[in-house]
């Protein structure tokens, strides 16, 4: 891993208006998470705020220059990168398709975990390099930022905000130890399923047992393996008595990439603001060649298929099975596909390298979306009311799709079992059973019926925190209680002890009385 | 109690527009609660909805005729009434002032509880009379209401909504068994204080013990004493296997008369919408004589005092003490006062029978509000940023004021100890210690800085429920779980049993091995 001095690029592009705007320091999470953060960054910039983004030299998704933000570049390389994840996804598909041994899966999982740990190690190095660079810290302090905006999928922004004494805003769905609600809102495991368990909010007894076991294991794993990096930095830079997870829970605002048309209803907190679907927008007209292709589908309409940006070439056998199933359908198909043309491809199927997914989903001719179950695609499908056939592969995809299945808007398939017949049956069912489309359109109506757009709501609350220097009145400090006090274990034990004491005294008194009576009786006898 | 047939007054006033509007059936809670409900009713009407309000013949606060709603009048009399409560408040003050015995207080409290039970009994009779009147039920069904709006301080609306199969919207702060959050959101007793305990969200160990004891007692009292009325009706009219409290928890929407500038931060649920301060509005100019009086105060400004509508004449000694304290101040005073003119009244004090409280609070000359701590007055004071000297007397007033004290915006006094000196000291402190006003103005800024006005938000969500026939996607059904499942007690016991079994088997195996080894050793010896 190549490490050198931290270099500050104060690339304050001329296009960034500063007058009357605030200043936001952004510590993002690299990879697909940046796609979400970028939406907020661009919107904040368009509203007149100055945004500074921290990025590692070899950042995978984050551009070095942008008209929307300036960058502070930290010269730390290594950690996760796109090539690794692309290769990983291909490997997963290969192992699943070849019904590879559990050991092969486990070995791959271990490799992935290693990569994640490496990623957190890299973030820690970025933090160390920032904190050790007095000039950079002085620059941060003199700039007088109004808030730190970060993705709690890593702990860098948390440390930075506390180090600089700035209000902390999360753009959250995942934290370093799992789904974000679990870190901040009471989440009874009896009806709040832990991702990626694929459970719903209505569980049988054994599903609840599974949920509890999953929860205990994950918390332990993450606290030990991931949290330890950040705990070490907390001791070093914030204070020896400070608990990293408390810093985390002390965030002013949690902008959650969640909407309850997708998530199951669950407890929340006053400082959680929901912005699920904040990236969704009305569709624009299609390019002419696509519009012509779509219109040529007639009454049958069009199916679109995309398995996300991380997917490389599909194995030939899988492509062939899917293509053969598509070929039998009266619909037209637009398939975002890489690699060789499948041998079984029908005349009705158009292969493309890239598609304007949102514009297609918003087209009235689109009947079905074949998706891997990435969150952004799901929200776009909900926004436009298009039902889904899901082929989950890695990460949270199966769990995301299981939520849609529970709501009756998706059919989900196992990539290891997938063949032409199974795929055709699934597509046919979702196309021809009206409940899928009706349910999805109901979700779409519910999702769109909000007093303000999710993105506007998110920006309002970021600006609220900037205006008021935080949101202390919305934030409980119950996380400072030890667990036995938080759960009232000490109080319950105390009350039980008192009750038992009273009982003993009463029993003692009764026994004494009895003995006294007995003595008198003996005497009188 | 006078009972007769139910009479339906279909007083659909000509002013009520029905075109494009929805239809809402309102089952209110009589008394001061109606003041809040009326705000929603009038706003719903102004937005083109047709509102029908159910009232008992001898209703205490609810007018029979209104341009904003029609009434369905149920001919049931008795229960609580204004005279009783006025007398009750006077008695409480008298007993407190005369340092009356604990027994006298207890006797009065018992009388109040009796009155509350009577009130719930009356509501039950209203429900029975409605349900037994086939013509009325047919009228309700044929009108095709879109939702039932009710105050969960009684259970009538809950039963009505379920009987008619309509979506249920609560205008809530109190339910039949206490503060409304406790019925719907997980409320850890370690940091969620139970009203009227006067505790805060940061409690010592013994305060947490008090909170737990209070909670247990209240839940028991209310479930037994108040809930029983409604449980009986549930068995009779909804179904023998139906639990009344489940009907209650199944409400689609909880419009909470709460804002976190006033309430401590605590867990909430996706179907809770906060509308605290929804009745607040900018002040209008004062009548000329008041404006002149206020302006005459010069740089010292004005104090206003009102102990609410339920207060009758104050005891003479109390009035005299307060008047004497006011007389010593350089400020002018406007005092909403009933009864004889206090002997010690100063020239600076104007007695009035009624005052435009909101318009006064919004006047820049007003420096201080002497209040009993009713919720509406508190929200108006927060809205306009005026600090408070509180003299709580009954109900939730002391608890309300304790929240303001914790936020550093009010000084609270005990009416039994109050004399001229104590009162003067309190008023002087709040007037001259800048933190009170600064803190209150900070709360005012936070309260006003919302993406939409609380009343608009409330109406949006009522209309949302009307448009979509409920809000099932925001509502957990976890209340259908038995308590041991909800709290995962069964799962934890199961996992402990499994762990113990494994332990026993392991210990058994080890022991068997040892024995075997020992036997062999003995043999070989």
Image: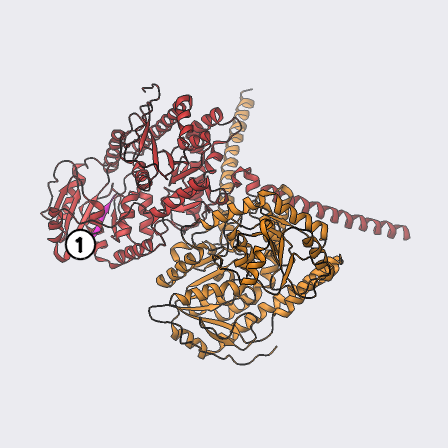
Chain colours: A orange, B red
Of residues B52 and A478, which is closer to you in this image?
B52
Instruction: Residue under label 1, please give it.
Output: B365
Locate the N terminus of chain B and report the quarter of the image it occupies: top left
Query: Mainly helix, strand or loop, the magenta region?
Result: strand
Q: Residue at x 62, y 41 (%)?
A: A204
Residue A401 locus on image (x, y percent): 60, 52
Residue A433 locus on image (x, y percent): 61, 43
Is residue A217 visible in the rendered image? The answer is no
Q: Residue at x 34, y 32 (%)?
A: B52
Task: Kindly indicate the quadrant of the structure image that contains residue A342.
Answer: bottom right
**Above or below, comparing residue B153 to residue A215 in the picture:** above
**Element under disc 1:** loop
Residue B210 included in the magenta stretch of the image: no
**Above or below, comparing residue B381 to residue A34 in the picture:** above
Q: Chain of mark 1?
A: B
Q: Is residue B130 left or right of residue B441?
A: right
Residue A201 locus on image (x, y percent): 56, 45
Is residue B301 visible in the rendered image? The answer is yes
**Above or below, comparing residue A119 to residue B38 in the picture:** below
Q: Residue at x 33, y 53 (%)?
A: B447
**Above or below, comparing residue B476 to residue B223 in the picture:** below
Residue B511 locus on image (x, y percent): 78, 48
What is the span of residues highlighted in magenta in the rendered image?
A: B363-371
Q: Residue at x 54, y 57 (%)?
A: A360
Q: Is residue B525 left or right of residue B297?
A: right
Q: Residues within 10 Å of mark 1 (few under 14, many from 20)?
A: many
Of residues B49 and B264, which is closer to you in this image?
B49
Furthest-right residue in view? B524
Q: Is residue A296 left or right of residue B116?
A: right
């Amino acid at each position: 891993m190549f490490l050198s001095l931290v270099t500050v690029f104060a690339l304050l592009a001329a296009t960034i208006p500063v007058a009357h705007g605030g200043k936001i320091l952004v510590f993002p999470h690299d990879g697909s998470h940046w796609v979400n953060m970028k939406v907020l960054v661009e919107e904040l910039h368009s509203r007149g705020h100055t945004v500074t983004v921290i990025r590692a030299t070899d950042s995978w998704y984050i551009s070095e220059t942008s008209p929307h933000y300036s960058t502070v570049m930290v010269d730390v390389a290594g950690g996760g990168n796109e090539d690794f994840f692309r290769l990983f996804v291909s490997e997963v598909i290969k192992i699943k398709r070849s019904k590879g041994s559990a050991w092969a899966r486990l070995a791959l999982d271990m490799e992935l975990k290693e990569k994640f740990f490496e990623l957190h190690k890299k973030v820690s190095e970025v933090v160390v390099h920032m904190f050790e660079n007095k000039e950079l810290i002085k620059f941060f302090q003199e700039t007088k930022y109004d808030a730190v905006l970060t993705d709690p999928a890593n702990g860098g922004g948390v440390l930075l905000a506390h180090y600089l004494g700035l209000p902390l805003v999360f753009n959250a769905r995942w934290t370093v130890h799992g789904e974000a609600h679990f870190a901040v809102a009471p989440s009874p495991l009896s009806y709040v399923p832990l991702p990626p368990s694929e459970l719903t909010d209505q569980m049988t007894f054994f599903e609840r047992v599974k949920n509890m076991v999953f929860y205990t294991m994950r918390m332990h794993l993450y606290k030990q393996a991931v949290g330890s990096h950040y705990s070490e930095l907390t001791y070093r830079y914030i204070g020896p008595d400070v608990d990293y997870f408390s810093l985390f829970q002390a965030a002013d605002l949690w902008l959650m990439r969640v909407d309850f048309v997708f998530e199951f209803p669950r407890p929340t907190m006053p400082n959680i603001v929901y912005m699920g679907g904040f990236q969704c927008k009305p569709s624009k007209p299609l390019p002419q060649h696509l519009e012509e292709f779509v219109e040529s589908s007639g009454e049958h309409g069009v199916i679109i298929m995309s398995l996300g940006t991380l997917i490389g070439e599909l194995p030939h056998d899988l492509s062939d099975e899917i293509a053969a199933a598509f070929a039998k359908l009266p619909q037209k198909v637009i398939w975002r596909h890489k690699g060789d043309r499948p041998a079984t491809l029908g005349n009705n199927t158009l292969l493309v390298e890239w598609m304007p997914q949102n514009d297609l989903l918003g087209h009235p001719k689109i009947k079905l979306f074949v998706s891997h179950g990435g969150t952004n695609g799901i929200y776009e499908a909900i926004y436009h009311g298009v039902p889904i056939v899901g082929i989950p592969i890695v990460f949270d995809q199966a769990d995301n799709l299981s939520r849609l299945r529970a709501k009756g808007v998706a059919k989900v398939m196992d990539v290891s079992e997938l063949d032409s017949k199974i795929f055709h049956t699934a597509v046919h069912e979702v196309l021809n059973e009206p409940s899928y489309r009706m349910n999805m359109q109901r979700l779409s109506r519910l999702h769109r019926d909000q007093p303000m757009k999710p993105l506007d709501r998110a920006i309002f609350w970021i600006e609220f925190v900037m205006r008021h220097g935080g949101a202390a009145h919305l934030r409980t400090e119950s996380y400072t209680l030890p667990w036995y006090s938080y759960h009232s274990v000490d109080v319950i034990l105390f009350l039980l002890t008192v009750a038992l004491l009273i009982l003993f005294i009463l029993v003692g008194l009764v026994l004494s009385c009895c003995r006294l009576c007995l003595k008198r009786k003996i005497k009188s006898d």
